[in-house]
Amino acid sequence: MKRIFNYIISATLIFALASCNEDEVLSSWVEQNPEVDTTPTGEAGTLDLSNYVAIGNSLTAGYMDGALYDAGQSASYVNQLATQMQFAGAGAFNQPDINSIYGFNGTFSDLDKEIIAGRSYLDLSIPGPNAGANGELLTAYSGDKSALNNFGVPGMTLLQTNLSGFGFPDVGNPYFTRFAANPNTSSVLGDALATNPSFFSLWIGANDYLGYAISGGQGDTPLATLDADAFGAELCSILTQLTADGDEGVILDLPPVVTLPLFQAVPYNAIPMDQTSADALNSAYTTYNGGLAQALSGMLIDQAEHDRRTISFSASAGSAFVIEDDELTNLGGLPSYRLSEPTDLVLLSAVPAFSAGVGTSIPAGDQYILTVAEQTAIVTARATYNAVIEVTVSALNGAGADIALVTVQPTFVDALGLDAETATALALPTDDADGVSGIEINGITLSPDFTPNGIMSTDAVHPNARGSAIVTNLIIDVINERWDASIPNVDVLTQLGVPLSEN
């Protein structure tokens, strides 16, 4: 007991002595351990970053989770890029603020029923994307339009970039209408050039084949709508105007889209089937199958097509479903039906339609499927446009321009986990084709989807904040190398993933 008492006395004395000298000790410690400034720093190298201007489509605007909303806009790859540039002395970056917490989600909205949905979220009870009726219709931008830096317009194609009156009220693109200098006459490029940019980024052209893909391959193919020559002429005109005053800039090449979750999340055999349902469906398609037999005997189709078109269901945890395929032989009054196949890509929009009988009692229309031929048209268009971008940039640089090409394709190959054979089939580079799904960031693997650990947003097309940060860092790395800059990278892992609730 005496020993314990001595310890208590000693501790008390030490505490008392420390208290008497607390200010002196603390002052000495601070002098020996000065506070470290952890604020990132950087240099602009040979660039003038005083007025960075970004031009592009929904990716540039910050559209994600099916809407343009505050958090998504703030997380756009260009806003993240501008933030990092400011550590190297760049000027302010003004966006046409949407001023909406949840934005407007056209996919989940039904204006006839006065349902205005907001940005989607990952509903783990489904599991899948869902949205609440908490959205808001677009409103006009009330800030200084002459001081804008972000000219990203959701839905914009290459040809629309320099289209006068693109924001014409009730006719043009409403996302441009809200911030165009003069909606009746302005073009996106014209308004951007009017701000006298000192540096620019351009990411445009994906919608020229994405629109065809999202429609299920309906209508003319992308290259039939916009061939290589027309694409190159318009791109050359845009870049020539952007570099006319000697300004430097970056252009990003175009990403693959058939690998997006929108086309990969639903398997071709997505419908559970019990035997009772299978028997009823087989009975319903008896007449159709009989017509195929007659077509075969009349030599209108061969045995292979007959077998491919025959509709037959059986009990299964995951059954193929009936689709319309206009690539089949036209048999006059007999519909062009077949069952979905492993090579078909099923759009995510088919899932709610399945519950209404689409794919079983009602054949699924072309809007729900991408056939091999349609996929090939999309892949070919992207590869063609990317080749044109590379040639155009090279030619302009040879004539005195200073444009850096940022290629996003290897990163997509890495994140998607493509093997060399698949990457080649998709006209993608193979250097990063390791066959391992996900992209590793600082020891953490992020998946190429809209799961909680993914890099895609819940609309299954646009990246989330993390995915946008990855794109930002690709641009920063190119800028730093080309122009001897030292702009710090974004910490990808600090960016938000997908929303997990309505609010």
Image (cartoon, rainbow, N blue to C red):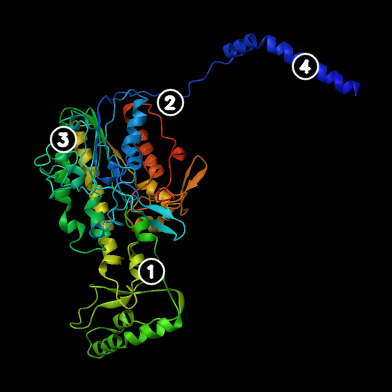
User: Disc 4 marks which residue?
Assistant: 12
Residue 86: x percent and y percent? Answer: 34, 26
- Nearer mark to the viewer, of 4 and 3: 4
Q: Which residue is mark 2?
A: 40
Q: Earlier in the sequence, mark 1 or mark 2?
A: 2
Which residue is the site of mark 1? 268
Instruction: Look at 81% across and 16% down and name the residue there.
Output: 10
Q: Which of label 1 and label 4 is nearer to you?
A: 4
Mark 1–mark 3 Cα distance, whole angstroms, equals 45 Å
Q: Nearer the N terminus, badge 4 or badge 2? A: 4
Please state which amino acid type lies under the numbered disc 2.
Pro
Please report the residue visible at 29 percent of the width from the left and 80 percent of the height from the top. 305
Residue 403 visible here: no
Point out the tag, 1 or 4, that comes first from the N-terminus: 4
Question: For numbered disc 3, what is the local secondary structure?
Answer: helix
User: Which residue is the site of mark 3?
Assistant: 191
Residue 225: percent from the left, percent from the top?
A: 16, 56
